[in-house]
């Protein structure tokens, strides 16, 4: 009996949505090709911890090739989708050579990029916190600021500027970075730079009137109080209108000199998602039905941050993207086999955030927790959610070595 030809499934992306699909997809049913400019999966919830070296970058990534050995992978980015010709145009990430890939089914899971909202100077002078190279830049810049401030001949004004670490955006990522920065300062930098430590300031700027606005009110108030007790100034109602090389300008005219500015205000569409001729919402998210099929198409699906089921309002989070990827892998197989399918149903597990000093927040459906025990819960929850045993052991080892020896302060 002649074997039936497998459908050709092309998956764009290697983030939470695409990766969970690739881990679940039945490669006996589909001939799967993945395309992504990032040849690894990144566990973003622990990315803020890598900016100061609490854990290493390589501890939270998983190469696509080894994680999904039955999937063909191309280290490239998709630049165009030809809907009529049913192929994607890709560009090699290293040599920029173009090639085409035909598809029977296409899954778009390209995520989002950091949003600058068109504010002048953000791209040139701000540092984002979205990927490992961003965390590497931040880590290097922190050490540079301290080393520069320690040089002879630096004026007190210049020293104050260099040691001012500003985070723009009071969402969970901005808060977690400020918390990690404070830990780094208190546990390592104060010892290495005792003369400089009293001059350090950390400022968290938020345009809205509160930080962590997706969290429970009591947890938000707790975090604000906690930060106030430390050297973290929380300035709500502070809208940034320009970022210059050494200072940030607020709408009320205040100029804030800084040594490091981390920009963590939200997300916007990738170039590809922006250009795709699909129906989108106001945030440029591709609109789909409850099975993730893109409106107006037969064979294109979109999942994760870059997509939205019309009429729903799921947050742009890892747990949403992961559940969508898993669902779609099962759904595609059932459809291929002519079976009936149920629509996607999201299960919300709650939110966690690290607030520094061995304290964390947990905003779960039936439990609101904060403090040390919640921090232990935070650590164990993320440890279990890491995608491989290697990652789990590495992260455990990193936490242990940081506890024993402290963080490394070399400028690499
Ligand atoms: C620092 C940080 C901390 C976070 N913490 C949490 C948390 O604690 N809990 C939580 O639930 N969520 C958290 N998030 C949000 C979470 O990471 C995202 O919601 C999730 O990654 C979305 O998954 P995704 O697959 O849609 O996109 P991503 O994970 O962003 O992946 C997108 C993928 O698409 C690839 N890509 C981009 N353009 C193209 C192209 N043209 N062609 C092919 N591939 C392309 C990218 O390289 C990447 O592999 C955090 C995010 C950040 C940045």
Image (cartoon, helix red, strand yellow):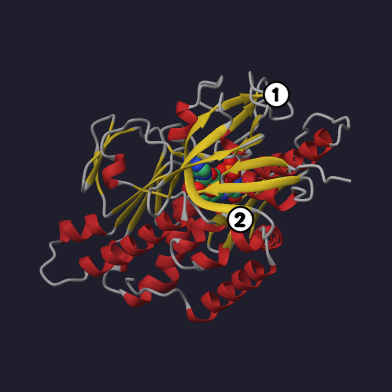
Camera-near label (1 vs 2) is 1
Q: Give the residue at x 30% y 74%.
A: 193
Q: Does residue 14 lie above or below 347 as drawn?
A: below
Count of picture labels: 2
Is label 2 within 8 A of ligand 1 (CB to nearest ligand atom)?
Answer: no
Q: Does residue 150 lie above or below 328 as drawn?
A: below
Q: Does residue 370 lie above or below 350 as drawn?
A: below
Q: Nearer the viewer, residue 266 or 273?
A: 273
Which residue is the site of mark 2?
A: 360
Pointer 1 local density, CA inside 10 Å: few below 14, some 14–19, many at least 20: some
As drawn, the residue found furthest toward the bottom would be: 405
Q: Quadrant of residue 287?
A: top right
Label whose residue precedes the other's in the sequence (1 or 2): 1
Which residue is the site of mark 1?
A: 289
Query: Residue 237, position in %: x, y?
Result: 40, 32
| 178 left or right of 324 in image | left
| 177 left or right of 258 in image | right
Query: Residue 401, position in %: x, y?
Result: 54, 78
Q: Secondary structure at mark 1?
A: loop
Quarter of the rendering occupied by the C terminus: bottom left
Q: Secondary structure at mark 2?
A: strand
Q: Does residue 159 lie above or below 35 as drawn?
A: below
Question: Is there any visible trace of residue 382 in the rendered image?
Answer: no
Q: Give the residue at x 53% y 52%.
A: 74
């Amino acid at each position: 009996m002649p074997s039936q030809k497998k459908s050709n499934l092309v998956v764009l992306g290697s983030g939470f949505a695409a990766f969970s699909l690739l881990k679940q997809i039945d490669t006996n049913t589909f001939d799967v090709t993945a395309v992504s400019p990032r040849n690894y999966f990144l566990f973003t919830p622990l990315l803020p911890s890598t900016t100061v070296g609490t854990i290493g970058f390589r501890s939270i990534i998983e190469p696509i090739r080894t994680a999904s050995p039955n999937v063909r992978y191309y280290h490239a980015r998709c630049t165009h989708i030809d809907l009529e010709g049913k192929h994607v145009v890709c560009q090699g990430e290293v040599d920029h050579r173009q090639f085409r890939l035909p598809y029977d089914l296409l899954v778009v899971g390209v995520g989002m990029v950091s949003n600058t909202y068109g504010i002048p100077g953000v791209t040139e002078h701000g540092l984002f916190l979205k990927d490992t190279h961003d965390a590497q830049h931040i880590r290097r810049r922190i050490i540079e600021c301290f080393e520069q401030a320690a040089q002879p001949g630096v004026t007190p004004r210049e020293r104050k500027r260099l040691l001012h670490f500003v985070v723009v955006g009071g969402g969970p990522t901005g808060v977690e970075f400020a918390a990690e920065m404070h830990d780094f300062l208190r546990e390592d930098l104060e010892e290495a730079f005792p003369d400089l430590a009293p001059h350090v300031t950390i400022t968290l700027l938020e345009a809205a009137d509160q930080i962590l606005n997706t969290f429970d009110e009591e947890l938000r108030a707790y975090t604000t109080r906690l930060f106030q007790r430390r050297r973290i100034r929380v300035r709500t109602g502070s809208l940034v209108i320009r970022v210059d090389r050494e200072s940030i300008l607020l709408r009320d005219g205040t100029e804030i000199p800084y040594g490091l500015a981390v920009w963590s205000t939200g997300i916007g569409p990738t170039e590809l998602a922006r250009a795709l001729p699909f129906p989108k919402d106001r945030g440029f998210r591709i609109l789909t039905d409850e099975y993730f099929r893109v409106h107006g198409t037969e064979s294109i699906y979109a999942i994760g941050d870059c997509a939205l089921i019309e009429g729903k309002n799921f947050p742009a989070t890892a747990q949403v993207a992961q559940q969508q990827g898993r669902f779609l892998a099962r759904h595609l197989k059932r459809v291929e086999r002519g079976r009936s399918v149920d629509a996607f149903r999201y299960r919300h597990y709650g939110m966690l955030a690290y607030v520094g000093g061995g304290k964390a927040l947990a905003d779960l459906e039936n439990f609101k927790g904060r403090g040390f025990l919640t921090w232990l819960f935070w650590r164990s929850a993320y440890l279990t959610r890491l995608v491989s045993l290697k990652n789990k052991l590495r992260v455990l080892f990193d936490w242990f070595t940081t506890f024993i020896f402290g963080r490394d302060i070399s400028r690499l």
